[in-house]
Amino acid sequence: MTAPTLAPAYDGLATYDDFTRTSCWDPIAECTMIMARPAAEPDLFARYHRGAVASYARFGVSDALDPDVDRCAEDTALFWVLTDISGQVVGGVRAKGPLRGPDDSHAVVEWAGHPGEAQVREAISERVPLGILEMKAAWLDKEPGGGRHRAKMIARSGFHAMGLFDISYCMATSAAHILDQWRSSGGVVAAIPAAPYPDERYQTQMMWWDRRTFAAHGDPQQVSAIVREMGQTRRGVHVERPVVTRVRGPVRSNA
């Protein structure tokens, strides 16, 4: 199957700093997914972060997440939240990047001193020229309603950014059972030995999404949903624009 073309959403969008937010709706999960920069939506990011902290605490892995919302925001390029029909934030994920090299990635911390560390560094280094976002701190509300469909929305989230900013790769590290849920969107688990992170209870693995080949690996329904959502995000993108005030004489900008 030929991978769909994920074109940039806004041709004049030059940098991440120009972007504020965009969103898409999933009628099956009955959720809206919002993608935004933390600086553009600080209150929404705080709601995402509170949910992530609570979720990590519930699973006994609080040490794997920075509890300080401001530090977490500074380390986040983009974040996504799922909101239900009542407006409640019921899940989300964040991204670091674009990575400039292995040391920008949290993955090297997870594999530090373990077999596979050199392979992790090599995998990141060879993909950096085409752009990488590292997906982190995914969580979903503990309520069972719509959980399976919402998990699939999380699995699709990185494509919103890849298409918007013309980036070729997303990467995530997680326990095997989580990555199994994310395979549906075309992610491929790297052939790298698992790392015992955040502790010996977990065997963390690395997964890559390639926007050029994801359709060959993803479930057809997920591929269709990705293409549909990319159309929604292209139409719904919001960017920062200078406020222009007309006065007598030349046009003056207060940007």
Image (tube, rainbow, N blue to C red):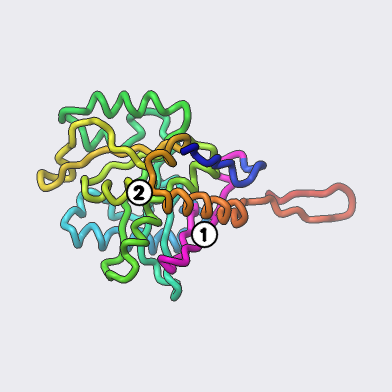
Residue 35 in percent (x, y) is at 48, 54
Amino acid type shown at disc 2: Ser
Q: From the viewer's perspective, is residue 75 above or below residue 62? A: above
Direction from residue 213 to residue 191 in the image, left or right = left
Residue at 22 percent across and 28 percent down: it is 117
Callout 1: 10 Å neighbours few (<14), some, many (20+)? many
Label 2 neighbourhood size at 10 Å, few (<14), some (14-19), many (20+)?
many
**Residue at mark 1:** 24
Q: Which comes before the other along the chain, label 2 or label 1?
A: 1
Q: Which residues are magenta?
A: 14-36
In this orientation, which residue lies closer to the viewer: 210 or 125?
Answer: 210
Can you see residue 189?
A: yes
Asked if the magenta segment contains residue 31, the reply would be yes
Extreme-right residue of the structure = 249
Select label 2 or label 1 by which is in front: 2
> Is residue 251 depicted above or below 141 in this figure?
above
Residue shown at the point (33%, 30%) measured from the top left: 103
Residue 81 point in image, percent of width and height: 42, 59
Rendered residue at 28%/37% (across/down) = 189
Secondary element under disc 1, as helix, strand or loop, is: strand
Name the residue rendered at 55%, 44% in the picture: 164
> Where residue 246 sits in the image (x, y, percent)?
83, 55
What residue does disc 2 label? 184
Residue 126 location, x and y as percent? 38, 24
